[in-house]
Image (cartoon, grey):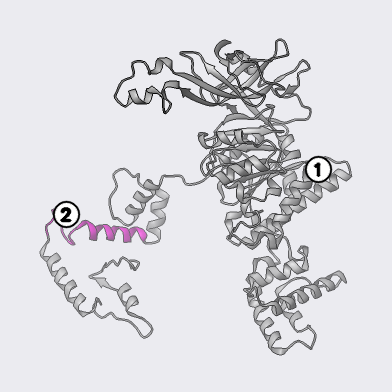
């Protein structure tokens, strides 16, 4: 190590300012060492938080600004300027090997050292722990030889919160974490709730992808009041129509009561329709008719929830057989079904873990909840995606993070907007990984509602690079917050081309502009287009726009119009005068002028309208 500066007056046990020596420099995030003021041979590790120059003669009211305004810097230039760095002390190892925070401030003029790589590694040695499953996720920023690991056993016991702006590295981190987990022994059980279908890339590494509807609970497993509300919402009963909704609750309760008596009945379209007639006679006939309209068998048969032959899997059986399960919510846009399935999976796994613990049988699993603000939104935040509080999925998640950690069921919570996630969820996570965050509300949430949040932690968040984050907490093997550059082997399955390439290809599809830079579509795409007739249509479009002469052996020169083309133009002008209708064409008995435009022809070639599809 070598001396690069000296401690200034005003240092305390939370912030240490020091003056840099001439020709020495440090940057934000660099690590420095300072001797412990009372423990012989012990060094304190500190991280640079801020660096700024100071020139006493360049302050307002001093001669420096006056001289600078005239272009002079003879006596007031850089030679009298010095640089001040501010470092936050992270701690030190005591004689017993325990990590401790700094208890008191160092003295003024105490040397500040720049450590070598080997000296720095001594502070990043993993904490000893039994029963851990360590996964390497990256390395310390600016120090590629110092690995950073997390313990998945601690995640299962204490939960993990991951946040960051779009494209900062959250989903990529989870993808690569799961890849490492699949290669470890033993293999942890991980259930990924995938809202956008971006984790399907993990199927190449051994993960199993399931349509979320495979875990949609059966109607008899749903509480009667909730089932009645769900049916009313699916059938389009207005929220204010309390009469119909109350009678639906009564019908569902009657069926449930008969099921408990052992009668051969279930929540089928036939049963729901039949039980409308079993309601007490005092119900008004008009109300009964309205119920029949909603609980019509044909309408009920279209509800996926009521299909008797639909596949259903127990999430516990699946997760015991397969280490990594991806539950794809993007296969169907029905938010009601999505929330029912997620709530059912969380409750089922948590209850099973509790039962196993009572029998003293081991079980552990980790849920990964992508975009958690749609599952458990903070009260007062308008999340216009379904009604999680009505379906109870937010309560299931909150109860899970509050109770399941003691039974080895952990949660990894991901979000772009921490301020929109229920604080009762965030506060239960004792491991935090923050990628780049610039919104003040989100930074304030991290500082206030996490165990390791502080104003200094949030000071790093806006300037983090892609795939770089601040890690701290129980699952980290490093006993202090550390900036880590995560390893990237694979990316989530999102857009595979840039927007420019997509637009070029779209132009080629309609033959608007031939693109020399865009590659030809793959053979199978071309064959499919030809089979559907789109290939022939595209050829005709190119012939019309490209100016190829019909029946001619060579293309016309630019600006040249043949006699046939002039004749076509004249005929086209006549047709336009008649009302843009082709010969023998016009709106039929039930067609309007728009339909007539769409049916126009020009000598066997399509005429294109910007607002009508080509025919």
Query: Looking at the rendering, which quadrant does residue 581 occupy?
Result: bottom left
The residue depicted at 36 percent of the width and 86 percent of the height is 589
Q: Nearer the viewer, mark 1 or mark 2?
A: 1
Which percent across, then down, holds residue 200? 58, 46
Which percent across, then down, holds residue 401? 74, 46
Classify mark 1: helix, strand or loop: helix
Which percent across, then down, holds residue 554? 15, 54
The residue depicted at 66 percent of the width and 22 percent of the height is 124
Q: Which mark is residue 215?
A: none
Tag 2 residue: 555
* Front position in the image: 459 or 306: 459
User: What's the CA distance linking mark 1 and mark 2?
Assistant: 77 Å
* Front position in the image: 101 or 178: 101
Residue 22 left/right relative to 484: left
Which image quarter is the N terminus in? top right
Classify mark 2: helix, strand or loop: loop
Instruction: Verify whether residue 559 appears in magenta.
Output: yes
The residue depicted at 51 percent of the width and 34 percent of the height is 463
**Alpha-carbon neighbours of circle 1 within 10 Å: few (<14), some, or many (≥20)?**
many
Which percent across, then down, holds residue 15? 62, 25
Is residue 208 positioned above or below 336 on the image?
A: above
Residue 133 left/right relative to 458: right
Instruction: Verify whether residue 389 appears in magenta.
Output: no
Q: Which residues are magenta?
A: 534-560
Residue 124 visible within the image: yes
Tag 1 residue: 407
């Amino acid at each position: 190590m070598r001396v690069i500066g000296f401690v200034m007056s005003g240092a305390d046990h939370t912030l240490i300012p020091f003056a840099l020596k001439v020709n020495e420099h440090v940057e934000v995030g660099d690590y420095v060492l300072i001797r412990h003021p009372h423990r012989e041979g012990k060094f304190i590790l500190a991280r640079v938080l801020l660096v700024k120059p100071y020139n006493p003669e360049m302050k307002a009211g001093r001669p420096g600004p006056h001289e600078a305004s005239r272009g002079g810097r003879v006596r007031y230039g850089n030679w009298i300027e010095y640089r001040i760095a501010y470092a936050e002390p992270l701690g030190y190892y005591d004689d017993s090997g325990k990590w401790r925070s700094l208890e008191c401030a160092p003295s003024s003029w105490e040397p500040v050292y720049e450590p070598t790589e080997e000296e720095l590694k001594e502070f990043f040695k993993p904490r000893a722990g039994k029963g851990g499953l360590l996964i390497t996720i990256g390395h310390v920023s600016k120090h590629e030889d110092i690995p950073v690991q997390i313990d998945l056993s601690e995640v299962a016991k204490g939960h993990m919160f991951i946040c960051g702006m779009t494209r900062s590295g959250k989903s990529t981190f989870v993808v690569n974490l799961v890849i490492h987990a699949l290669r470890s022994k033993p293999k942890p059980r991980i259930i990924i709730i995938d809202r956008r279908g971006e984790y399907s890339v993990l199927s190449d590494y051994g993960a199993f992808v399931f349509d979320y509807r495979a875990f949609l609970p059966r109607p008899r497993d749903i509480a009667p009041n909730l089932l009645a509300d769900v049916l009313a919402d699916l059938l389009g009963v207005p929220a204010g129509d309390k009469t119909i909704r109350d009678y639906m609750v009564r019908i569902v309760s009657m069926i449930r009561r008969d099921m408990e008596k052992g009668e051969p009945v279930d929540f089928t379209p036939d049963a729901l329709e039949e039980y409308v007639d079993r309601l007490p006679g005092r119900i008004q006939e008009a109300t009964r008719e309205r119920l029949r309209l909603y609980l019509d068998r044909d309408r009920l048969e279209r509800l996926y929830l009521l299909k008797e032959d639909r596949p259903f899997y127990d999430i516990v059986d699946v997760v015991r057989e397969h280490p990594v399960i991806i539950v794809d919510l993007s296969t169907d846009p029905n938010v009601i079904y999505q929330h029912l399935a997620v709530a059912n999976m969380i409750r089922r796994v948590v209850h099973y873990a509790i039962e196993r613990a009572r029998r003293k049988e081991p079980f552990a699993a980790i849920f990964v909840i992508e975009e958690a603000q749609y599952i458990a939104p903070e009260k007062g935040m308008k999340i216009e995606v379904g009604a999680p509080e009505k379906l109870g999925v937010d309560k299931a998640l909150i109860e899970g993070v509050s109770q399941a950690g003691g039974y080895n069921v952990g949660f990894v919570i991901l979000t772009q907007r921490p301020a929109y996630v229920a604080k009762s969820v965030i506060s239960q996570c004792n491991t935090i990984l923050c990628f780049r965050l610039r919104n003040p509300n989100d930074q304030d949430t991290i500082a206030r509602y996490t165990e390791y949040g502080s104003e200094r932690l949030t000071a790093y968040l806006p300037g983090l690079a892609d795939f770089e984050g601040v890690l701290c907490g129980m699952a980290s093997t490093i006993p202090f917050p550390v900036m880590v550059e995560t390893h990237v082997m694979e990316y989530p399955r999102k857009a595979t081309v840039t927007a420019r390439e997509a637009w070029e290809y779209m132009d080629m599809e309609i033959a608007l502009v031939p693109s020399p830079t865009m590659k030809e579509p793959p053979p199978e795409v071309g064959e499919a287009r030809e089979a559907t007739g789109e290939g022939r249509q595209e050829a005709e479009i190119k012939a019309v726009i490209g100016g190829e002469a019909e029946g001619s052996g060579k293309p016309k020169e630019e600006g040249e119009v043949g006699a046939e083309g002039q004749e076509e133009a004249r005929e086209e002008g006549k047709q336009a005068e008649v009302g843009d209708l082709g010969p023998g064409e016009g709106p039929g008995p039930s067609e309007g002028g728009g339909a007539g435009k769409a049916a126009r022809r020009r000598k066997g070639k399509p005429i294109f309208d910007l607002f009508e599809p080509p025919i």
